[in-house]
């Protein structure tokens, strides 16, 4: 099939190639003169275009030689700086940023799912204790997500053992829930501290290489020193950026945990008061 297509293509090229030649042979001398003039004009136009193109190329080369930066997108600029700063040392803060962001997003999602309308939940528990007793309140706790509902269930489950046991159960299980809320924060704080430290390490090693090059060259070249310092400082910049981003997430998570802990404490006190009010436990 390919041979057939190639044959047709060759035949078409030959046919279209000979057709203009036959038409040119059949033209009159006057027409030939007009054709010559048109060809000369087209040649002049092509020559002018070539000169303009060469001038534009020379201008572009001059701009590139002068070192003027090209227009790059933000992502392209990041890639360029990443390569300039030595991919090995730049990858270390990047790894800290990626792992820290993954942990931060997981904590944010978990904390948002753990947040409920505590006032509405307390009203439901009070209504259940008033009308259906402890079992009805426990059913509501089973069907509600979050640490407050879990603490309430543990307290209601020990209602028959007395109010002191309820309070101890609520306090103990509240500590467990607080640990679950703060899970992974120590690792996140580690990455916040580690990212700029790795950036500084890359900077120091880059400076050492720059001074080694100066020693090997036997002279202090401004280009060598400035280029080495620029490349080495890029690792510090990326490390600081990673630490700043992770610090913002860390502060948000800590504030969210503190808010949930306060709600847990207030709700626990309200639970004990409600159980005493409706006499669902021993005093």
Image: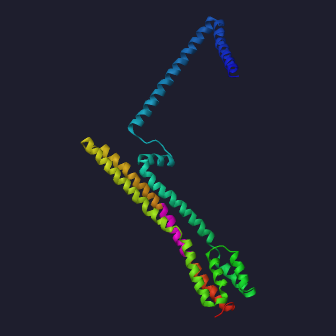
Residue 267 shown left or right of residue 68 in the figure: right
Is 195 covered by the magenta stretch? Answer: no
Quarter-of-image position of residue 10: top right
Is 251 covered by the magenta stretch? Answer: yes
Residue 82 shown left or right of residue 22 in the figure: left
Residues drawn in magenta:
245-259
Q: Camera-side residue: 255 or 60?
A: 255
Q: Camera-side residue: 43 or 193?
A: 193
Residue at (35%, 46%) from the top-left corner?
A: 227
Residue at (51%, 61%) from the top-left corner?
A: 100
In the displayed structure, 123 sits above or below 106; it is below
In the displayed structure, 206 sits above or below 108; it is above
Horizontal and vertical percent for residue 275? 66, 88
Residue at (62%, 79%) from the top-left corner?
A: 151
Characterize the magenta stretch by its predominant secondary structure. Answer: helix
Residue at (64%, 6%) from the top-left corner?
A: 25
Q: Camera-side residue: 31 or 203?
A: 203
Horizontal and vertical percent for residue 74? 50, 49
Quarter-of-image position of residue 141: bottom right
In the displayed structure, 117 sits above or below 4; it is below
In the displayed structure, 187 sits above or below 59; it is below
Horizontal and vertical percent for residue 168? 58, 85
Residue 157 shown left or right of residue 105 in the figure: right
Residue 4 shown left or right of residue 262 in the figure: right
Kindly give the residue lying farthest to the bottom in the view shown: 283
Horizontal and vertical percent for residue 42? 55, 18
Kindly give the residue lying farthest to the front in the view shown: 161
How many circles with numbers are drawn on the protein? 0
Kindly give the residue lying farthest to the left in the view shown: 218
Q: Quadrant of the C terminus?
A: bottom right
Q: Quadrant of the N terminus?
A: top right
């Amino acid at each position: 099939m390919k041979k057939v297509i190639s044959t047709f293509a060759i035949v078409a090229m030959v046919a279209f190639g000979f057709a203009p030649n036959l038409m040119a042979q059949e033209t009159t001398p006057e027409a030939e003169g007009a054709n010559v003039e048109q060809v000369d004009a087209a040649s002049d136009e092509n020559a002018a275009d070539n000169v303009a193109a060469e001038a534009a190329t020379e201008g572009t080369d001059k701009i590139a030689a002068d070192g003027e930066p090209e227009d790059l997108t933000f992502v392209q600029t990041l890639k360029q700086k990443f390569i300039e700063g030595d991919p090995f040392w730049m990858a270390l803060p990047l790894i800290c940023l990626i792992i820290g962001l993954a942990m931060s997003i997981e904590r944010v999602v978990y904390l948002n799912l753990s947040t409920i309308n505590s006032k509405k939940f307390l009203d439901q528990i009070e209504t259940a204790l008033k009308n259906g007793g402890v079992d009805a309140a426990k059913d509501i706790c089973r069907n509600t997500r979050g640490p407050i509902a879990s603490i309430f269930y543990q307290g209601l489950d020990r209602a028959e053992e007395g109010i002191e046991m309820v309070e101890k159960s609520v306090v103990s299980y509240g500590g467990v829930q607080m640990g679950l809320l703060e899970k992974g924060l120590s690792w996140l704080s580690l990455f916040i501290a580690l990212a700029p430290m790795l950036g500084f390490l890359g900077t120091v090693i880059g400076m050492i290489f720059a001074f080694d090059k100066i020693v090997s060259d036997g002279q202090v070249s401004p280009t060598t020193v400035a280029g080495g310092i620029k490349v080495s400082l890029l690792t510090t910049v990326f490390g600081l950026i990673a630490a700043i981003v992770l610090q913002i997430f860390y502060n948000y998570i800590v504030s969210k945990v503190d808010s949930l802990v306060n709600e847990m404490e207030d709700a626990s006190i309200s639970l004990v008061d409600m159980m005493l009010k409706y006499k669902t436990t021993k005093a």
